[in-house]
Image (spheres, grey):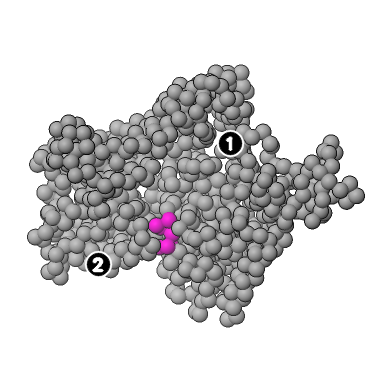
């Protein structure tokens, strides 16, 4: 090993990025030395304090050891020569994300790598690469490319046959959309109604790319893990001859590393994943597809709070620079696009592709509003809705009931003294879960047994208040106990939420049962409302939609409309089945406010009208996308300290660049003020200029760190900046 303190050795200085906070003052990279020059993007292990950490060699033109004492620059410990360096486009993406989202370069670049890389030595990694190469070689002896999406083994699996099925014929709308996409270099927004065949357009776009360019790679992103296996199955069925890997948090660390390596080496030509996949290394990336681009799950809520959808646009631009041919394209798809993307398409920055018709000519669900002011007291489901569900089950049809609240009830309460099942560590209620008789906090994870009597007054009559999916499942089963399904048996109810799908493989098993007709009624949270292709559902009902009509978050109506329209899209997807049943496809919404204008647009499935109305309101109020926002959150032992940090930093920031273009609102407690005994506060910053906001935030970080040392801010644990926040 080279000794950096030996003046007789000629050592090369290297800029190495390691994980250090943005406010540390250490700069984007640290200086190390090595016996030989290393390419930017090379993975290394370096000493940092008393630890050995993973690092990335970075560009540093003109870097020298001049001014450093002998031995001051420490030596690189190991070089991961077996892995090709991360290319300039990937490094540019990491640099941009760090700057824009106000994090250090190391926090973004190193967090984007598979976690297991941090624990491996260079020799261990070299052995793993040999095993992967051997497995890939054995799977391609018949001339096929390696297929690395076998999540059970975490390594390539051999394919014994060519593609399993011929692609279906495109509808006229699909063909036009695909043709226009191929002819225009702008980012494209595929605005297609639910059931219009957007996924087939994605598949064809990928197919045409990979057939034309034998080296090209494609990235396909979905918002949630539960959609990945379904989409992966379709890609594997269609593209058995190409390597397909998945990247999401549901994989083991070993699987994530294997799949990342196969993509990085170009052996996997199709990568499917959730938001983390935007940072995957794909050296020949030529196409990025973002399915359900409106979904808030694309925005990270921890660490570097990045938007994978927005980074997809930037990454495609970066990947295209200096490459001809080889332009990287972006295809955003949704039946309910985000208002930001919709406006970009309206003003011509994005290419708008429209597919308003369902495949097979199927009808969109008809809206039936249930005025809860006219229903029996304590009504769970309106009698007419209950009757319609029973009639459909008797004909072999299925129904879906949406309630975006898991657990049995949001809270247990004593009506004698007013006690409620509050979480001892959070300013939130502990949710009652009847199945295991527990009170669980969905914020900090605290769990306790349900008390036998009221802890305050001893009253034995403590009761659930409100309704969650567990209770709704139980109530529907009871209300339909006398009804019968098509085969004469009792109606079967299935619940799908984060609790019922906790066990590995349970989601896939339950979805398979639904597809095969084992269940008649599906009850669940928003995870059932998007992406799934249920063929027998002819009725969708939302039983508690009013919360989004008057919420304090200005994005709430947009999210409610998207959720209801996406949920409605699960009904009537098989036009031939609907025709054979002679049934009406319906969306039922139980509401106390049937006159609300949101429902008028929903009844017509008129997203453009809804978007126009929302954008007009946003423009008048100067809200995004007509302004730019950042949210600064502080966590402390006391609420006073958290707010003091933000207010002190705001005062210190008065003279910073860009301040005249900004509005800094006073610090306030967050909606859920305390989580896990940590108090939380936030400050909203608005600007009419994105560059001004960025310049201010970059300079303001030092003021935030200085404010943390003030006596008033004693007890502050951490703070974070959220650029373009999706929830306020």
Spot occupied by residue 368 in the image (x, y as percentages of width and height):
20, 46
Q: Is residue 329 above or below residue 170?
A: above
* Quarter location, residue 196: bottom left
In the rendered view of the protein, which quadrant contains the C terminus? top left
Residue to which mark 1 is pinned = 102
Answer with left or right where residue 138 lies relative to residue 677. right
Q: Is residue 391 magenta?
A: no
In the displayed structure, 689 sits above or below 204; it is above
Q: Residue at x 43, y 59 (%)?
A: 228
x then y, percent, for residue 519: 23, 63
Residue at the location (63% across, 59% down)?
A: 120
The residue located at (84%, 42%) in the rendering is 70
Residue identified by numbered label 2: 517
Q: Is the Cβ of the residue at disc 1 closer than 8 Å to that at disc 2?
A: no
Q: Is residue 31 left or right of residue 223?
A: right
Give the x, y percent position of residue 122: 68, 61
The majority secondary structure of the magenta stretch comes to: helix
> Vertically, is 699 above or below 327?
above
- Which structural element holds mark 2? loop
498 and 241: which one is in front? 498
Which quadrant of the rendered structure holds the N terminus?
bottom right
Front-most of residues 345 and 590: 590
Residue 253 at least partly seen: yes
Which is nearer the eye, 103 or 414? 414
The image quadrant of residue 464 is top left
Quick one: SS at disc 1?
Answer: loop
In the image, 682: left or right of 18? left
Viewer-nearest of discs 1 and 2: 1
Instruction: Find the magenta span and give its range.
Output: 225-231
Mark 2 neighbour class, 10 Å CA radius: few under 14, some 14 to 19, many 20 or more: some
- In whole angstroms, how far apart are the C-alphas of marks 1 and 2? 50 Å
């Amino acid at each position: 090993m080279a000794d950096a303190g030996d003046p007789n050795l000629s050592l090369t200085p290297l800029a190495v990025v390691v994980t250090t906070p943005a406010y540390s003052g250490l700069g984007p990279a640290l200086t190390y030395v090595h016996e030989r020059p290393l390419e930017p993007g090379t993975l290394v292990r370096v000493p940092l304090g008393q630890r050995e950490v993973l690092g990335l060699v970075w560009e540093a033109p003109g870097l020298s050891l001049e001014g450093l004492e002998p031995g001051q620059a420490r030596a690189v410990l190991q070089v991961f020569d077996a892995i090709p360096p991360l290319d300039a486009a990937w490094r540019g993406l990491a640099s941009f994300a760090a700057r824009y989202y106000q994090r250090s370069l190391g926090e973004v670049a190193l967090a984007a790598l598979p976690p297991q890389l941090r624990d491996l030595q260079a020799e261990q990694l070299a052995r793993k690469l040999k095993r992967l190469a051997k497995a890939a070689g054995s799977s391609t002896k018949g001339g096929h490319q390696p297929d690395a999406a076998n999540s059970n083994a975490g390594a390539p699996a051999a394919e014994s046959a060519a593609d399993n099925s011929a692609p279906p014929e495109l509808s006229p709308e699909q063909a036009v959309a695909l043709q226009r996409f191929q002819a225009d270099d702008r980012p494209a927004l595929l605005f297609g109604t639910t059931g219009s065949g957007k996924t087939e357009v994605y598949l064809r776009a990928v197919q045409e790319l990979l057939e034309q360019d034998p080296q090209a790679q494609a990235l396909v992103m979905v918002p949630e893990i539960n959609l990945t296996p379904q989409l992966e199955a379709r890609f594997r069925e269609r593209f058995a001859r190409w390597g397909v890997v998945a990247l999401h948090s549901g994989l083991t660390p070993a699987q994530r590393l294997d799949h990342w390596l196969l993509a990085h080496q170009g052996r996997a030509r199709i990568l499917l994943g959730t938001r983390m996949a935007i940072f995957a290394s794909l050296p020949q990336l030529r196409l990025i597809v973002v399915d359900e681009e409106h979904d808030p799950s694309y925005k990270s809520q921890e660490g570097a709070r990045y938007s994978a959808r927005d980074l997809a646009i930037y990454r495609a631009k970066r990947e295209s620079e200096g490459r001809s041919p080889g332009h990287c394209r972006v295809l955003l798809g949704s039946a309910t696009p985000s208002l930001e993307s919709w406006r970009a398409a309206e003003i011509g920055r994005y290419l708008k592709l429209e597919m308003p018709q369902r495949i097979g000519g199927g009808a969109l669900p008809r809206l039936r509003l249930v005025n809860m002011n006219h229903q029996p007291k304590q009504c769970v489901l309106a009698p007419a809705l209950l009757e319609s569900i029973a009639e459909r089950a008797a004909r072999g049809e299925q129904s879906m009931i949406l309630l975006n609240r898991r657990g049995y009830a949001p809270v247990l309460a004593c009506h004698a003294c007013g006690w409620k099942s509050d979480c001892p560590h959070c300013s939130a209620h502990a949710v009652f879960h009847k199945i295991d008789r527990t009170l669980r906090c969905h914020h900090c994870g605290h769990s306790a047994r349900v008390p036998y009597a009221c802890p305050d007054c001893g009253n034995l009559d403590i009761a659930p208040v409100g309704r969650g999916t567990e209770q709704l499942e139980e109530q529907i089963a009871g209300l339909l106990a006398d009804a019968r399904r098509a085969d004469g048996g009792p109606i079967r109810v299935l619940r799908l939420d984060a609790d019922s799908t906790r066990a590995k493989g349970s989601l896939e098993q339950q979805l398979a049962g639904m597809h095969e007709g084992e269940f008649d009624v599906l009850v669940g949270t928003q995870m059932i409302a998007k992406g799934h292709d249920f063929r027998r559902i002819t009725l969708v009902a939302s039983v508690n939609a009013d919360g989004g009509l008057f919420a304090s978050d200005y994005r709430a109506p947009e999210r409610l409309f998207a959720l209801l329209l996406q949920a409605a899209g699960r009904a009537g997807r098989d036009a031939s089945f609907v025709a054979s049943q002679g049934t009406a496809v319906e969306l039922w919404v139980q509401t106390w406010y049937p006159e609300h204008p949101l429902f008028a647009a929903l009844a017509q499935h008129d997203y453009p009208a809804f978007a126009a109305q929302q954008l007009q309101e946003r423009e008048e109020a100067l809200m995004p996308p007509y302004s730019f926002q950042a949210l600064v959150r502080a966590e402390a032992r006391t609420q006073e300290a958290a707010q003091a940090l933000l207010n002190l930093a705001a005062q210190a920031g008065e003279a910073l660049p860009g301040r005249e273009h900004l509005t800094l609102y006073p610090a306030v407690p967050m909606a859920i003020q305390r989580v896990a005994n940590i108090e939380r506060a936030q400050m909203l910053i608005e600007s009419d200029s994105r560059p001004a906001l960025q310049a201010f935030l970059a300079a303001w970080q030092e003021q935030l760190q200085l404010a943390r040392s003030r006596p008033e801010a004693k007890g502050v644990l951490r703070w974070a900046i959220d650029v373009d926040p999706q929830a306020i």
